[in-house]
Amino acid sequence: MKTVKTTLASVAALAALGLSVPASAGTTLDAVVKKGYVQCGVSDGLPGFSYTDQKGTFLGIDVDVCRAVAAAVFGDAAKVRFTPLTAKERFTALQSGEVDILSRNTTWTSTRDAGLGLSFTGVTYYDGQGFLVSTKLGVKSAKELDGAAVCIQAGTTTELNLSDYFRSNNLKYTPITYDRSDETVKALEAGRCDVLTSDQSQLYAQRIKLANPDGYIVLPEVISKEPLGPVVRRGDDEWFAIVRWALFAQINAEELGVTSANVEQLAKSSTNPDVRRLLGAEGEYGKDLRLPKDWAVKIVKQVGNYGEMFERNVGQGSELKIERGLNALWNKGGLQYAPPVR
Amino acid sequence: MSTHVFKPDLPPPTLSVGVVGWLRANLFSNWFNTLLTALALYLIWVTVPPLIQWAFLDATWSGSTRSDCAPGGACWVFIQNRFAQFMYGFYPQGLRWRVDLTVILAVAGAAPLFVKAMPRKLVYGLAYLLVYPWLAFWLLHGGPGLEVVPTSQWGGLMLTLVIAVVGIAGAMPLGVLLALGRRSDMPAIRVICVTFIEFWRGVPLITVLFMSSVMLPLFLPEQITIDKLLRALIAVILFEAAYIAEVVRGGLQAIPKGQYEAAGALGLGYWRMMGLVILPQALKLVIPGIVNTFIALFKDTSLVIIIGLFDLFNSIHQATVDPAWLGFAIEGYVFAALVYWIFCFGMSRYSMRLERRLHTGHKR
């Protein structure tokens, strides 16, 4: 019986060790500063958005969003810990305080913004559902897909968007549903379906998995709006503003031509008042956010501006080679726009 | 006078001995068996050669990036590249010796228990059970004198083994207690045990894990967080204990009533009767059932993928979404299958050995 008691005792001891109660539950920023790192909820694996490399380092756009916040708060982009979350547990993890930011390719919708006690701070990536077809089909537009067999990865929104789109365009189609993205790719390759549909950012990842990626193209049509962005708990406006402005700083930096390579030099020598205000050379704009004066310098220096972040993770600097498209700056034909720092 | 000389025996008809005879007797004895044999041969023919071709002949064994991989064959470079991560997860590279040491200590510490001539085996075994868990926890997690590695960085095969071993070590004693409780004469204890067992057997493990990770935090005040791994461990222990309890109860019921009465007649109290007479016989009877449950538990650990823990399976899944290695999911899953098979097969062989050694002639 001794063994039983020992085991029970060790379980109880483990429980005591596992319980951690912070001394005081203040605002999120105070709690974050106190524990010394930002706890960030990311995806459990999505190419380009959050994944790990050989050394176990987290990489991707969703990951960089959190690193930018850490750079702003601590001046050190490494002071962040990641919690991989599945799609189903992500909101609970945020609500229960397990993570400070949820940056997990989460689509901004009215229900999520208004109904869950959460707030979206911005849009890091404008995504939308698209189509991947074989060039052999000779199709140039989704409107020509009448009667096609469509491979879908199980997941209701994708299926609903698809059915809405085909119905409103008076087209017929046969859905073929699979459970995992790898299966849909194999099915497309084997000719079991003519076209594969998924969020566009993922179609590029799917394409790499094909034996002959050049034989397939992503059609130009985007049939749904999927703005992806970081989420925080509602009711802490201070923390909300920090997460929101970390992204705005990156977008502003790109617009003003500030990159990780020239940011330190510009902070000293720039004469452009917009740049000087962003980088803290003029005014006290960090103070309103309860951040150090050079918060934006740290973000751009350590994580890069929005364009650098995009190209490194999903754009030309990555295997995915996704075009900027909707994610280009507003003055270059895209939607990325940030209010000015002043 | 002539003696009759027997002619030497004729060799048996060539068609009924040797390879041909065996084939005729076992594979082609009638038209139905011939048909089945042909079908089986056909299935082997269409599956095995392409598999060997893919896994060995066309496979790429060395390189460093995906561009080194030849199309058409398996690319084991991917596995090689990520091997350390599959084994240790995100455990800091410089501290991985601690994991190795934990495993070495487990093996070295348990080894004397397998030496037949070892004196005071029981005392040593109990001491081992008392000391080792703390030592392992100190080594893996850190604490006084060692850098702390939070459980969020544990992963790979190491995490799978932690969940499986802790699950087994925790579920076994708890399960035995529950089985005894279910057969107890005291109604309160019996009701509690029956309720516990039926509750945990009635819900799928995936639901239990999900509840522990999604529902529990909602009931707790904000800012109190229980370690995710700990929640999973408790869920696994409670869940498996219910199964073990039922397996052990099967063994208890198989012990003839005379054994209980004989033990009672010797003046043994309840615990000594159970500990010295009934349980040793009952547990020996249900070794196959217990090992069966443990093998299932070992494979079920992969379900922790739904609460975002990076066990062996999830580490492999995670590696397949790295853009640098997209498209090598099959290699990853084959590797996962191989590792799981090695462990489960090992467990099953060990249980057979154990059954043979403890065999004392009760088998009919």
Image: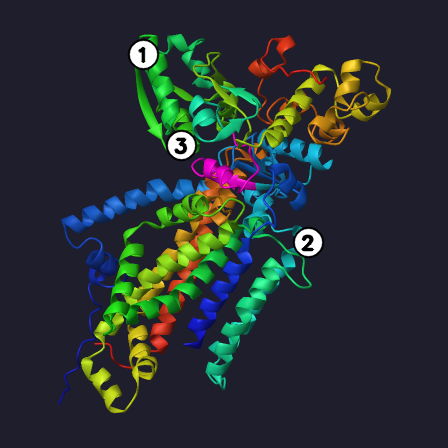
Question: Disc count in the image?
Answer: 3
Dot 3 corresponds to which residue?
A183
Q: Is residue A85 magenta?
A: yes
Residue at the spot x=69%, y=39% of the render? Answer: A78
Going by the numbered disc 2, the residue's amino acid type is Gly
For mark 3, give the secondary structure: helix
* Residue in front for this viewpoint, B241 or A135: B241
Q: Is residue B282 above or below residue A283?
A: below
The reply to whether dot 1 and dot 3 touch (C-beta < 8 Å) is no
Dot 2 corresponds to which residue?
B94
Going by the numbered disc 3, the residue's amino acid type is Glu
Residues behind callouts 1 and 2 on a single chain: no
Going by the numbered disc 1, the residue's amino acid type is Arg
**Comparing labels 1 and 3, the label whose residue is closer to the camera:** 1
Quadrant location of residue B233? bottom left
Stretch in magenta? A83-105
Q: In this view of the protein, can residue B295 be seen by the observer?
A: no
- The outermost residue toward the bottom is B266
Q: Is residue A53 above or below residue B277?
A: above
Residue at the spot x=75%, y=21% of the render? Answer: A278
Between marks 1 and 3, how big is the CA–CA gap?
A: 26 Å
Precedes in sequence: disc 1 or disc 3 = 1
* Residue in front for this viewpoint, B25 or A339: A339
Residues behind callouts 2 and 3 on a single chain: no
Q: Is residue B123 above or below residue A66?
A: below
On residue B345, the disc is none
Residues behind callouts 1 and 3 on a single chain: yes
On residue A167, the disc is 1
What x and y, as percent, mark residue A4?
A: 42, 72
**Quadrant for the C terminus of chain B in the image:** bottom left
